[in-house]
Amino acid sequence: MSKLSTAFYSTTALCARPVLRNHISTPRNDRSGASVTKKDADRSSSVAIMMRKKIAVPPLTTASLKSIEGQSPQTITRHINRKYLQDTIKGGFRFGTIAGYKPADNAQGGRLGDLQEGSQRLVFSSRTGMYNGNFDGAAFQDVSIEGVESPIVIEYSVNDYCSCSSINGFRQDRANTLRARGNPDIDTFVVYDLEKLTKALREIFAENPMWQHFEILSRRVIYEEKDCHWSVEDEVAITEDRDHLEIWLDTSFVKSRAYEHEEEVRMLVIDPSKAGQLAEDIKLLPIQDPRIAGAVIEHGHF
């Protein structure tokens, strides 16, 4: 019997092929030996085995993007520092990245304090502490893992250009809450007509040979538990057949309920041939164009 007791190590495994849906089987027991719950994971918890995987979303068409966009608000509000106001109302618009929003450590708070940003985890635990079978390419035979809170973790990561705003027009109560919860530097707001903003951005992308392949996807953020926790018994077979489109959407547009006060809508700029696969060392997509200024309908300080 192999045993891991408060010993931590990490392994990286890439998905061998695109996945279709999650499948867990328990060949030693016809009765289900695996159950799942979704909950907010404590990302600071101890991990014995970590397997990090990249996603492979199938190429997306304009029609498929439209089908997953959902109903967007007519207006969105960005909360910024007043030093950026003049540049913004003249047509400045900057996309950060999903990876760039993830904090470097647990001490950071506010909008950059979400440790789940850009990733989704499957956490596997056994009541007996014993693990047998295939965990998405990693084979275990009578392995005992003790003394850790998250024994086996498979983590999927995504990255795209991203702009975060709040739904609808400016509200003083929401702005006050945002500032009080880790964003002391915000004191200014800019409200956009989302349809006009999207139209302007698409025109700008179409005119630039380096950006002509970009598509825009806007969706409201859903606030619910993001990570999946599996309780496994007996021998399990976790196969490489997860739906990577679902992983991408869950990772990009689902956040912990702790951030529900943000009432966030996200605008992603993606390469539809490889959504979610933007290199993590890319930081910004800055744009300056008077057509964007035409989408501004209100601004002020608070």
Image (spheres, rainbow, N blue to C red):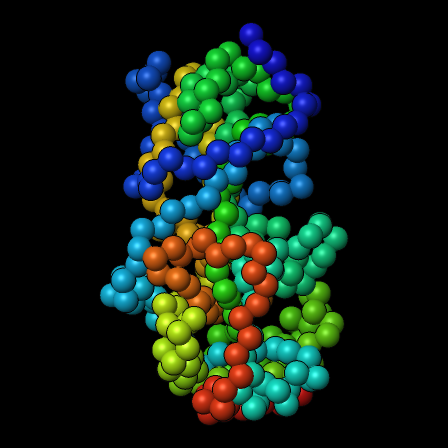
Q: Residue at x 36, y 78 (%)?
A: 206
Q: Position of residue 60 (x, y in %)?
A: 30, 59
User: Against 105, is 94 above or below?
Assistant: below
User: Against 16, is 5 above or below?
Assistant: above
Q: Nearer the viewer, residue 194 or 202?
A: 202
User: Against 18, is 98 above or below?
Assistant: below
Q: Position of residue 237 (x, y in %)?
A: 38, 24
Picture mark count = 0
Residue 165, visible in the rendered structure:
yes
In the picture, measured across the screen, residue 290 lies left or right of residue 261, that is left
Q: Nearer the viewer, residue 253 or 214?
A: 214
Q: Residue at x 44, y 67 (%)?
A: 269
Instruction: Say which quarter of the image contains residue 208.
Output: bottom left
Q: Residue at x 52, y 23 (%)?
A: 126
In the picture, measured across the screen, residue 211 lies left or right of residue 144, that is left
Q: Quadrant of the N terminus?
A: top right
Q: Quadrant of the C terminus?
A: bottom right
User: Against 65, is 87 above or below?
Assistant: below
Q: Residue furthest top?
A: 1
Q: Residue at x 61, y 55 (%)?
A: 102
Q: Residue furthest left?
A: 63
Q: Position of residue 270 (x, y in %)?
A: 42, 63
Residue 224, visible in the rendered structure:
no
Q: Position of residue 207 (x, y in %)?
A: 38, 80
Q: Nearer the viewer, residue 71 or 161?
A: 161
